[in-house]
Amino acid sequence: MSPHHQSTPARLTAPATEKLPRIILFLLVLAYIVPGLVGRDPWKIDDVVGLATMLTPLRQGGISWLIPHVGPLELAQDGPLVMWTGAGLIYVFGHALGDVIASRITNLLWFGLTLISVWYGTYLLGRRTEAQPLALPFGGEPTVKDYGRLLADVAVLMLVATVGILLRLHETSFVPAVIAFQALAYCALARMLDKPLLGALMLGAAMAGAFLTRALPGLLPILFAVVIAFSPRSILWLSRKWLLISVLLALSFIMAWLIPAYRASPSWVQEWLHWNRLYFGLPEYYVALRPLRDLPWFLWPVWPLAGLSLWQWRRWITAPHIWIPLAFALGMLLMLPITAETGEPEFVLFVAPLSVLAAFALPTMRRAVINTLDWFALMCFSVTVTSVWIGWFALHFGVPRQIQLNIQRLTQGFEPHIAWWTVIVAALFTLLWIVLVYWRLRLRPSMLWRGGMLCASGISITWALLALLWMPAVDYVRSYRPMSSQIHQALAKLPSQNGQLACARSQGLSLGARASLYVFDGINFSYDSSCPYVLQQTTKEQLLDGMAGYSDGATVLWEGSRGADRYDRYRLLRVQSK
């Protein structure tokens, strides 16, 4: 007898699938995504570079609408889709909300697409016969609809609860978008099981979106996943002919951009192809071992549950509810050995498929194991909430003293001030966590989503507290705005023509610094070697050793650094014209 027709490892009663109120789920994801999008400057590197590419076409127009630029600098990497989306939103909402806030509406869009895709894809898979729990002798098992909704809710909660993607989802960069298109591709495969044409169209849109977001590094994990998912042992094999529609649709979107881009700037496309080639390669041994060190914390707490799910469902491994999310996890796993430098932009693509697998683990777990997840959430996030408040007291009131000294060392030059409205809102979030702890300990709810909800609530509340209580200090450390203003003032004092800023060349200037200066003060850099002014990025050690460029024969007009940066130094120099 086929394993798909055997009784599944899922054991569940109807009370365990009691519906999670939609308003609670909505408020939870809102509390997760909104803090951190407001009340701060864009930070280096991907965050501010993404914003700079959005602002450039609005300020300069022309070819920068077709290929990404940071000011006059061509940025031959990734794709134009995030730039187009952000520029459009800034154009529509920038006057009312400001450019920075308007650009971050993109984060809401990508996050919304991710959640909807994960939820609906899991709902479709959870309603299938192969995923259903064992029928109880005297009835009482959940309905198909309730069971599917429970699994979809838990998948979303586990995604939100994953530690590693928290900061990345709040960046104005390609990362939130590439997660969203991978999730859309997952939903598309789930949809192809019953509506192959619609699923094929969704898959084509997802592949095109991933390519126009991150080029080949964005598209290849999806292609690998599709090849694995459509293996002959999978039920998707019957729908393989529809993949032609997906490929043609994706190619049409890609060529609609790539051909005009090549006609407009063949050199940019060649550099872009070169960047794609450099992305791939055999990593150095220490880079190859990096995932073993970083992935366990990055994917916490979903990876243990995903592993348990694979073990519990091992006899049903080719069933769609396991095979499809597993294919996406394997697709990203295949990328690691051929990626020259792996890091968080790659690790994020494990989160959505592992969250789905984690959701399918819960119906197979014993009550004692499920309670362990609850206790982990209660203890872990009670500690994090308390720690945020202890750090805030140390920063503002000097208690505990040792923690204050550590904070002062990291935020050297920062002058703390208290905005009491943020303290009041933070206190309300803390009270909410106390209520959740009371709800779990006193009422002992039986709903299976409670552990995921506690984890997601814990990380959301901790993040909200950090954004409310710590954002001014973190912004001081990570923002280039004060330094950019100083450089702008120094340039404004220099002689210039046509009422514009004096020309300036750059030496050793990082992409993050260049993008920040463009975003905050519209500072561009000249490539004219006769320009007498140079903005130099160097280090404190190089200056002390006399190893910085232009050490001799140059006049220092301004010198400074970013916030509490203890390493980098920036100098505006007047040098001998060539």
Image (cartoon, grey):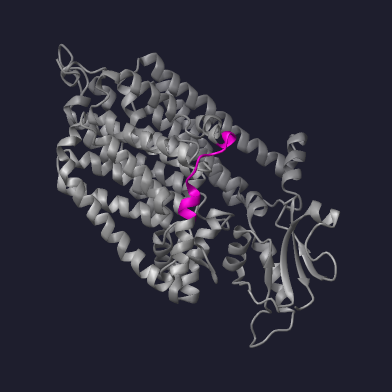
The correct choice, above or below, for 91 with respect to 497 in the image is above
Q: Does the magenta stretch include residue 257?
A: no
Q: Please give the name of the residue rendered at 85% of the width and 53% of the height, measured from the top-left corner.
A: 545
Q: Residue most toward the bottom?
A: 498
Would residue 98 be seen by someone viewing this image from the given angle?
A: no
Instruction: Tell me where residue 263 sits by quadrant.
Output: bottom left
**Where are the magenta residues, as a range?**
275-287
- Left or right: where does residue 243 sit relative to residue 505? left
Residue 229: percent from the left, percent from the top?
27, 35
Closest to the observer, 215 or 369 = 215
- Report which quarter residue 533 is drawn in: bottom right
The structure residue drawn at horizontal position 20% and vertical position 24%, both measured from the top left corner, is 132
Residue 332 drawn above or below residue 296 = below
**Residue 426 on image: x %, y %:** 55, 43
Report the magenta stretch's main SS.
helix
User: Image height check: is 199 above or below 358?
Assistant: below
